[in-house]
Image (cartoon, rainbow, N blue to C red):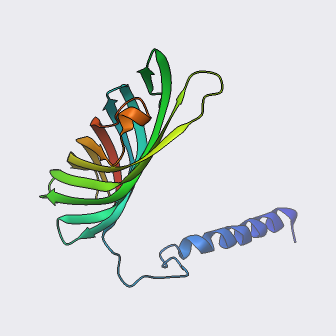
C-alpha cells in the first residue's frame, strides 16, 4: 500500500471511531434509578444582613423543602452568624456567635408570574455563645427558641431558578440572652435567597 494511502485509510478509521458517539447523541442517557414522578421541591443558599442590639452582622445559611399544591411550601432552614459581633458589658467587650434553624412554612401568591410575593415563618431552636475579651475567659452558652416571619419579593429567572429579596424579624424566647450573652439577639434582617427546583 502506498504510504499516503495508508495514512488516509487510518484517518478515515479514526474518524469513524470518534463520530460513532456523536451519531448516538440522541439516545437517552442511561442512569441507575429513574423516578416515575418528579416531586415539586426547591432549595438553595441564603444570606441575611441582620441588625442586633449590639450591632450588625451577616448570617449565612439556606433553605429547602417541598411545594404542596400551587402555593404552600414546607421544609427546613438554618443560619449561622458569619461576621464579628461585639457587645459591651461593664466596659468589657464580648464576642457573640449564634446559629439557629427549624421548620419553615411558606405561602406564595401568584407564583407563576414573573414577580410574586412569598410569606414565610421559620420556627425552631438556636444556640448562642459569648466570651469576654480577657485572659482566661470561658465561653458561655445559651439555647433559645426562635420565630422568624419573613416577606419576600421573588423573581422567576428561569423555569427552575428563582431569586428573592425580603425582610424578616427574629423573635427569641426561652433564655435571658441579654443576661447570658450581654445582648439580646432579636432584630430585623434583609434577606437574599437563591432557589433552584421544580414548582
Residue lying farthest to the left in this orientation: 110
Q: Quadrant of residue 138?
A: top right
Q: Residue at x 76, y 70 (%)?
A: 9
Residue in front for this viewpoint, 31 or 105? 105
Picture quadrant of residue 89: top left
The count of marks equals 0
Residues 152 and 131: in front is 131
Horizontal side, residue 11 vs residue 194: left or right: right
Percent position (x, y) of residue 179? 39, 33
Q: Residue furthest top?
A: 91
Going 56% across and 70% down the picture, which residue do you hit? 22
The structure residue drawn at horizontal position 30% and vertical position 59%, both measured from the top left corner, is 104
Q: Is residue 9 above or below residue 164?
A: below
Vertical position of residue 70 compared to residue 48: above or below: below
**Left-right relation of 162 to 109:** right
Please provide percent x and percent y for residue 1. Answer: 87, 72
The C terminus, quarter of image: bottom left
Residue 148, given in percent of the width and then of the height, sits at 26, 48
Q: Is residue 77 visible?
A: no
Regarding residue 128, the answer to whether it shows in the image is yes
User: Residue at horizontal 43%, vertical 33%?
Assistant: 181
Front-lying residue, 19 or 112: 112
Amino acid at each position: 500500500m502506498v504510504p499516503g494511502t495508508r495514512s488516509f485509510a487510518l484517518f478515515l478509521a479514526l474518524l469513524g471511531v470518534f463520530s460513532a458517539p456523536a451519531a448516538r447523541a440522541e439516545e437517552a442517557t442511561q442512569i441507575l434509578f429513574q423516578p416515575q414522578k418528579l416531586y415539586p421541591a426547591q432549595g438553595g443558599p441564603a444570606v441575611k444582613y441582620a441588625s442586633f442590639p449590639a450591632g450588625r452582622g451577616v448570617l449565612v445559611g439556606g433553605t429547602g423543602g417541598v411545594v404542596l399544591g400551587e402555593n404552600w411550601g414546607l421544609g427546613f432552614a438554618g443560619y449561622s452568624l458569619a461576621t464579628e459581633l461585639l457587645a459591651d458589658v461593664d466596659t468589657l467587650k464580648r464576642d457573640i456567635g449564634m446559629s439557629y434553624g427549624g421548620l419553615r412554612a411558606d405561602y406564595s401568591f401568584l407564583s407563576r408570574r414573573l414577580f410574586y410575593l412569598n410569606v414565610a415563618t421559620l420556627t425552631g431552636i438556636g444556640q448562642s455563645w459569648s466570651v469576654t475579651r480577657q485572659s482566661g475567659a470561658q465561653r458561655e452558652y445559651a439555647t433559645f427558641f426562635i420565630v422568624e416571619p419573613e416577606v419576600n419579593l421573588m423573581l422567576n429567572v428561569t423555569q427552575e431558578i428563582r431569586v428573592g429579596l425580603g425582610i424578616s424579624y427574629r423573635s427569641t424566647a426561652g433564655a435571658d440572652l441579654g443576661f447570658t450573652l450581654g445582648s439580646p439577639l432579636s432584630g430585623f434582617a434583609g434577606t437574599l435567597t437563591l432557589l433552584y427546583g421544580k414548582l
